[in-house]
Image: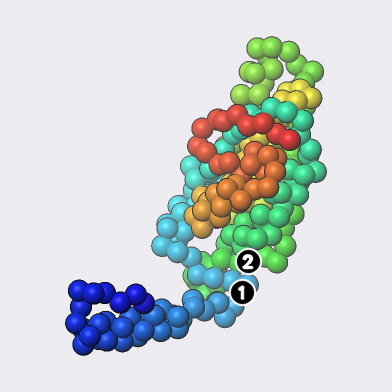
Amino acid sequence: MQKSSTLSPVKQALLERRWKRASHGLARRPEIPRRPNRDSAPLSFTQRQMWLIDQMTPGNPAYNLPYGFRLRGQLKLTALEDSFNEVIKRHEALRTTFAVKDEEPLQLIHPELKIKINVTELDHVAGEERENRLEALASEVSVKSFDLSRLPLIRVSLFKLGEAEHVLIINLHHIVAEHVLSGVHRAYRNASTRVDRAVWGFCPVAAEHDAQ
């Protein structure tokens, strides 16, 4: 700690002692402990609200969170699929379902989940008809209901419009998105390839991305 010429030696010594105590306290700040049970967890207040609504109106798509992207450039389907499965591996919420135990809702965390991207080819359809078909199919997958008791609670659909043009629809239930979106944004910022950026550039409106 640099000494200040405006303080007397006594005040300087007192300041240094306080600084050392503060630094020592920061260094020993306790870490947040891991949950004792890694296979389950209680619901947050927000999750409980969404779960109760789903119990009253099962399959209600009101809490679906669809995101759409138009990707331009050559696209490697296996790389895209692997990117999604890697993020699912890292985020427990994307491997979670919901059950009831002792009359209380509970999150059940599954050890593994691998999804397949559903591909629909529209490159044989031309012009305005292709866009109309795309809009209808994208709307259909966006409102398709989720069963909170079964995996997956995230779906990925890819519509092929041409060799170098695709539309990607990512749809997940809000109940698992609550703790995931910040991690998804971090994955986007840290992405090492343009394909990953295309996958993880979540936004609530249609966007265009170049794909490697």
On screen, residue 3 versus residue 156, left or right, reads left
Q: Position of residue 196 (x, y in %)?
A: 67, 44
Earlier sequence position, callout 2 versus callout 1: 1
Residue situated in front as seen by the camera: 85 or 3: 3
**Residue 56 percent coordinates (x, y):** 47, 52
Q: Secondary structure at mark 2?
A: strand
The single residue placed furthest to the front in the displayed view is 5
State the quadrant of the C terminus.
top right
Q: Quadrant of residue 69?
A: top right
Q: Which mark is residue 190?
A: none
At a point 45% along the width and 80% down the height, the residue shown is: 27
Residue beneath label 2, please?
109
Query: Which residue shows up at 79% across the image and 38% down it?
Result: 76
- Residue to which mark 1 is pinned: 38
Give the residue type at disc 1: Arg
Position of residue 81 measured from the top left corner of the image (x, y, whole percent): 75, 45
Q: Nearer the viewer, residue 50 or 89?
A: 89
Whether label 2 touches label 1, CB < 8 Å = yes
Q: Residues within 10 Å of mark 2 (few under 14, many from 20)?
A: some
Q: Is residue 189 above or below residue 67?
A: below
